[in-house]
Amino acid sequence: MVTPRTSATLTSATLRSLVGLGGLLFLFFLLVVPFQESRAQSLALFSRNHPELDWRVATTDHFEIVHPARLDSIAARAAPIAETTYDSLATALDTTFSERIQVVLTDQDDIANGFAALLSGGAVTDIWVHPTDWATKFSEPSPWLRTVLSHELVHLFHARAVSSDLGALEQLGIPGFWSEGLAQYQAETWNAQRGERWLRAAVLDDNLDYDDGQSLWNGRLLYASGHSQVRYFAQQHGDSTLTQMLHHRSERLFGLLETHDFETAFRETTGQPYDTFREQWRRDMNVYYNTLAGQIETLDSLRTDTLRVPGRGVLDLKYSPDTSRVAALVELSPERPVRRLYVIDRSAGERHMVAEGPIEPPVAWHPSGRQLAFSRRARGPSGSVIDDLFLVRAGGSGERRLTRGRRTTAPTFSPDGDRLAFAGSEDGTANIYAMTLPDGEPTRITDYAGNIEVTGLSWHPTQDTLALTHVGPEGGRTLRLYDMAADTAAVLTGPSTDDQRPTWSPGGTKLAYTSLRDGVPNAFVQDVEWGTRRRVTRLVRGAAVHDWVPVDSAFGAAEASTKKAATEAVPGEALAVSTTLSKTDDGAFLIPAGHRADSIRPSVPQDYAAWRAEQPPHPIPTDIPPDPSLIRSRGDYNSWAGLTNRFSFGLPYYFSPGSAGIAGLTSWVEPTGQHALNAGGNVSVVAPLKDSEVFASYTNRQFAPTVNVSLFSASSSGRIYGNDLLVQEQTGGSLRLRWPLDWWARPYTSTALEVRLRYVDLTPLDRSEFVPGPGALQAPRGGQQASVRLQWTRRHRPPYRHTLVHPLDGWGLRLRGTAAGEVLGGDSSFLRGDLMGYGVLPGLGDQRLFLHGRVQAQTGSPFPQDYLGFSRYDAIELPALSESAPFTLGDADRVRGYRSYALGTRLAFGSAEYRIPLAQSLGTKLLGLVSLGRTTVSGFLDGGGVWTGANLDGATWRAGAGVELKNALSVGGLRIGHALGAGRPVLKGDGTDWNVYYRVQTALPF
């Protein structure tokens, strides 16, 4: 027998809360506050506070350059870049700013990125300077600061050019691909890493969809697609049409508003719909790239041996010294973008993971074959995100951190294994360091100065000579040999060919390296003694060199020597390479080290190739020298004065003759992330003192803990109590302090300590209409409550697209203590302890076993609505809801299969679920806003008990089992985990009826 869920009644107060301003403000805290809080935190501070920074501001004609005091010299470099870019874009896009643009520079985190936003109160861009890995991710022939700052300023000019009566909200309608394409067209060249290699692979696969979720490089494809389209547009229609399109306006609301609409502007300025243009662009891209592919050798022609490695993206391959094992650094998939370092036993075909996390290639084997060194992003001094060196045993144990805050890359061992060299960066200057193992301190062995980067370090097999990629102040990359004994360097290649990642031949007479001169990576070999150079591959999709493999000592040289190879390398030697097999997958291969590629130079008719060389009429110079004279003034930065309005608006409302007024929202951020302010509320014109409501939340990040202050006076709802939705008028506030802790650091793991002080005056609405329902609930009680909550949380949560409904791994532990006292007029007094934990264990394939447990104990007299026990209804879990919101969505557990309350002062609860993926998507989309995504089916067993005091004789024990369908619901971009299930009691005497339920919960409890 199946019994449906008993429905809750809806009182007049409940309905008023659901349709009134309480619902509007609930959405405000659900959608706006978390976005603003996370956004402010990401602005230059990357999830850690930095009270140690002394912020300064340098003012130019058009900019306020905000920066830590130690970056004064970088501000002097940024000033001419910003002003030169401003002049170029003002002319090219026919747009200017009446106010100064704020540019925030930071080097606290090792991040190769930037951010720009046009706010209602002004324009701001944040720039991370001194990243160590930009030269491997970008192939732009200009310095990092020039590339990123000019790019972000184009975004601001673009947003200002299209802004109209909707103000800054207009930019929400700019297609992402067009925004990034215009920024690259104006500020960058068409090159390998920012366009060619990603577009080429997608076109050859006839799959240009960057929103399909199938490729690790879809983000890069979005940039490449937009970049090529804007260049193609300029070549077909001219730059003046491009500018004209930005300034096009359409009338809305009977001429009351003028707005910019991308597709309307495109059609009316070009005379054709955007879809027609895109099809023409797609056709010409097909002709160009397929013509190119028809003239270039294929992977099959290279007599390759396929290497079986896990993961969709191959980042590095290194053979052990005896070649019996391969270290493979891979990225698993776009759904699961986790980087892992595997060691693969070639004879047994077995593999095991030795490390994971944001590991940067290359990795290095110790000559003994017992250890591996790598550089991985981790928390450094003051919680900064920094690349540091790690050492791990080849079996995966004994991981050890060798440096802290060094900004490292490219570790390489000496031939005897006693020393480890690496590139480290300080204040934007990279140098080579060496340390004696096992416990020596790093010593700098080069003396580079200025804006220099070093990547791709490789130690000679028998000598103290290092091969490296040197990135000069102008952004040019050259291969060099550095003689450690003589302290001299020899340049092997010029800056125009973009050569990277050198690796020595086993005999030390040659270097293999990867070059991006073709727009995709291809392999080359250089004879160091004679200076001759040989192209090894000319593949249309490219091939990146990772290692030079000696004659196969693990399986016998005799077998290896029988392989056919050219005479230019020892027979049997091979290059370990990776290549782009398709838009979605990399492949790993061994190719003969002596191979020589065809000397053909492919050509494509100019009509199809001209777009690649298209340039804006007012190009931004690639190298702009520092000019401190552009700075008109310098001074201390006032973060309060920097508080900028994100948006503010007010609207009249009318629900009934007794419910009418004006409701509004406002949001303010500060560019360095030190302050964020959000508020919402309504003023009733009928009963302004009684029915007006307000919420306000202020976040401060000027201290080690993040400080949040919330004030509220409003009705709120969110949980069923008895048979009704509990609605309470709440007036009060809270003070919350949160410390992220870098204890026991490991990848994808976070630890935090939190303290919350809260004072609230509660008035349950319609208390007289309370219906208790099954169980011993009392009517909710009003009064004042003063409480303090202390919480410690540690959790491990690797990134996964479907964590909301089906996490593949992770664990968490949360310890919480809450106390309320009869102070400051408080009417309740209690002490409650709460310990919760969970873990996700592997099953068959992507199936998982989820375990969850919780114990609670309480003493004192809380309000009845704050009971400890089992609930009749499931608590609502919305991961996006800010903790500063004064909403209570419920926190009590329910044993599925039961529909009654069980109350006490002690509780133990446990749950086990075996989760099976059912469908990637249900293929349902309503009105373009609502969709049903990932779906799983689970078998579950819940159980636990509730009792009072230390006596278990009167305990209420429950156990329920059943099945549940979980689904990821997307509503306008907000993702919610919800489930439909059926459960029944399994304990004798508790009945056998099945209970059907629906709940809104995430797959992980915290």
Image: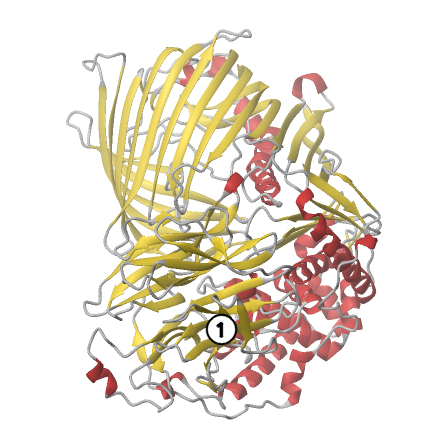
Q: Quadrant of residue 611?
A: bottom right
Where residue 8 sits: x, y (%)? 42, 27
Tell me the residue at 36%/71% (across/down). 462
Q: Is residue 871 visible?
A: no
* Figure check: 760 above or below 682: above
Coloured how? secondary structure
Which quadrant of the figure contains the C terminus? top left
Given residues 665 and 807, the one toward you in this image is 807
Given residues 928 and 586, the one toward you in this image is 586
* Figure check: 399 above or below 651: below
Which quadrant of the figure contains the N terminus? top left
Q: Which residue is mark 1?
A: 207
Circle 1 crowding by C-alpha within 10 Å: few under 14, some 14–19, many from 20: some
Is residue 102 left or right of 544 when viewed as pictured?
right
Where residue 893 sits: x, y (%)? 34, 28
Is residue 723 left or right of 955 when viewed as pictured?
right
Where residue 162 sits: x, y (%)? 76, 58
Is residue 763 left or right of 529 when viewed as pictured?
right
Tell me the residue at 68%/74% (across/down). 231
Q: Is residue 858 visible?
A: yes
Identity, as a three-letter code, of the amino acid under mark 1: Asn
Given residues 272 and 827, the one toward you in this image is 827
Where residue 181 sits: x, y (%)? 65, 66
Given residues 968 and 737, the one toward you in this image is 737
* Figure check: 399 above or below 143: above
Q: Quadrant of residue 326?
A: bottom left
